[in-house]
């Protein structure tokens, strides 16, 4: 599913900067079953110049990951149908390179499991974002994860 800043509906990509852009914008995939969280993150990411795609259905998230091939994934740990640990493992198995930021409001148990999964796969440990989060914390984390210039708009 794709989120559109213009309509506020899930119908298109966000963050496209036009044909005169020298480099393609970095891509962020947001996987969370909470529509409000997805909307907030998509708007903030767009303000940073990221092309953002929202995947609110955990059972379809790996297909969205393969289709979109994001530079980074913001992944909720607790979702119905399939949790973030399973999704993280499945996405790492694809071999598609991406950085991961894990979100949870339920303590650090899932976060420790996720670090174990990334260690098993021999990849960089994921960044962590606790829910609820502040705008500044999300922006700083996205900038650090994707090496975004601090002078870019927010």
Image (spheres, helix red, strand yellow):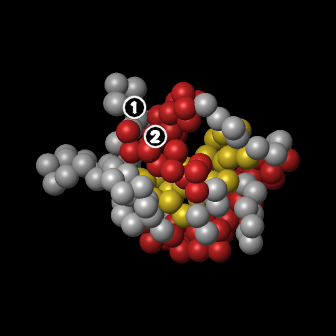
Q: Is residue 153 left or right of residue 73?
A: left
Q: Which mark is residue 44?
A: 2
Q: Residue at x 55, y 32 (%)?
A: 135
Q: Is residue 116 left or right of residue 143?
A: right
Task: Give yes or no for contact between labels 1 and 2 (Cβ–Cβ under 8 Å).
Answer: yes
Q: Is residue 55 above or below residue 43?
A: below
Q: Which mark is residue 154?
A: 1
- Residue 146 lies, in percent from the top left, at 46, 41
Rendering quarter of residue 149: top left
Q: Can you say which quadrant of the picture contains the C terminus?
A: top left
- Residue 21 lies, in percent from the top left, at 19, 47
Q: Is residue 33 left or right of residue 55?
A: right
Residue pushed farthest left?
20
**Label 2: which secondary element:** helix
Mark toward the start of the polypeptide (1 vs 2): 2
Binning the other alpha carbons within 10 Å of mark 2 as few (below 14), some (14 to 19) or many (20 upward) gives some
Q: Residue at x 64, y 56 (%)?
A: 34
The answer to whether residue 102 of the structure is visible from this angle is yes
Rendering quarter of residue 31: bottom right
Q: Is residue 50 above or below residue 7?
A: above
Give me the C-alpha separation between circle 1 and circle 2. 7 Å
- Residue 131 lies, in percent from the top left, at 70, 40
Q: Residue at x 42, y 55 (%)?
A: 8
Binning the other alpha carbons within 10 Å of mark 1 as few (below 14), some (14 to 19) or many (20 upward) gives some
């Amino acid at each position: 599913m794709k989120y559109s800043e213009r309509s506020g509906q899930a119908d298109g990509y966000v963050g496209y900067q036009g044909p005169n852009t020298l480099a393609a914008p970095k891509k962020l995939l947001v996987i969370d079953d909470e529509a409000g969280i997805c909307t907030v993150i998509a708007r903030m990411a767009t303000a940073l110049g990221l092309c953002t795609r929202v995947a609110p259905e955990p059972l379809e998230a790996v297909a969205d990951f393969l289709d979109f091939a994001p530079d980074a994934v913001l992944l909720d740990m607790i979702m119905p149908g399939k949790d973030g640990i399973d999704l993280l493992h499945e996405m790492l198995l694809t071999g598609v390179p991406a950085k991961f930021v894990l979100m949870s409001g339920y303590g650090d148990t899932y976060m420790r499991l996720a670090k174990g999964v990334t260690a098993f796969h021999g990849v960089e440990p994921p960044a962590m974002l606790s829910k609820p989060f502040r705008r500044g914390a999300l922006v700083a984390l996205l900038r650090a994860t994707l090496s975004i210039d601090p002078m870019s708009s927010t």
